[in-house]
Image (spheres, grey):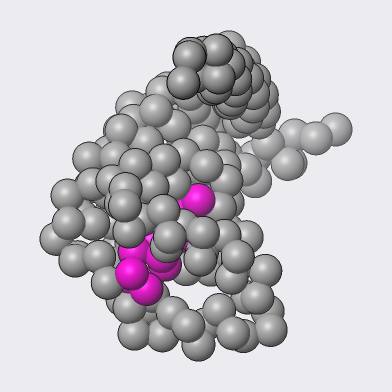
Amino acid sequence: MYGWVIDAVTGFVHSPWLLVVVLAVLIGGAFLPGLPGGTTLLTATAATAPDWRSTAAVAVTAFAGALIGDLIGHALGRHYGTRLLAHRRLRRLRRPVLRARTAMRRHPTPVLAGGRFLPGGRLTSVLAAGISRVRLARMLAVTVPVAAVWTAWMTALGVLGSAVAGNHVLGGPAAALTISAVTTVAVVGVGAIIARRSRGSALDQPA
């Protein structure tokens, strides 16, 4: 009944348009809110696996898009940051970007690195880096290796999802997204527990 859907998806997955979409979303995700870069990469790698050539092409394209987007986002933040945040459609970004800018003045490296793995964090951290006048070379020294790690992680999750779903072109992305969601919840939960215990230990120490 749904054979035509599978055929259509399979045809798209094995066409150059998949790489065009991945590149566009990964570039735009650095300065356009709402573009799901991580979900796009995860879905694309899960759909192309186990064809390692196609999966590698998706990963390389995503990595290139991430770097190009970071360059554009940094330039926009540097030259037009305050005006962009004043736009009525982008005002909801004002508070997180300004918080990131404040944190970046003291700790630019963890803000840039952590932003890559948080929903909406990449856009916030890259724009904040531009607004804060973080030198491009310094930003790239952090974002290039972090983008490589992020790309490898998402690609691995996509391949795992495909394997779990028996290399099904639709089941693979669904399984990969589920695995990613569970992993994210687990990591955030563990991080919250560690942070809570650290605060408790600090309070228990004598003044």
- Residue extending furthest toward the front: 207
Residue 89 locus on image (x, y percent)? 68, 79
Q: Is residue 144 visible?
A: yes
Q: Nearer the viewer, residue 202 or 42?
A: 202
Q: Could you tell me which residue is drawn at 49 percent across and 27 percent down?
A: 158
Q: Residue at x 41, y 53 (%)?
A: 103
Taking 190 as reference, is 51 left or right?
left
Picture quadrant where residue 204 is located: top right
Residue 127 counted in the magenta span: yes
Q: Is residue 199 above or below residue 28?
A: above
Return the residue nearer the eye: 99 or 60: 99
Residue 131 included in the magenta stretch of the image: yes
Image location of residue 127, percent across then percent down: 42, 67
Question: Magenta segment, which residues?
Answer: 121-132
Of 36 and 58, nearer the camera is 36
| Spot occupied by residue 97 in the image (x, y as percentages of width and height) | 51, 64
Whole-percent x and y of residue 21? 49, 58
Residue depicted at 19% across the width and 66% down the height: 135
Quadrant, the N terminus? top right
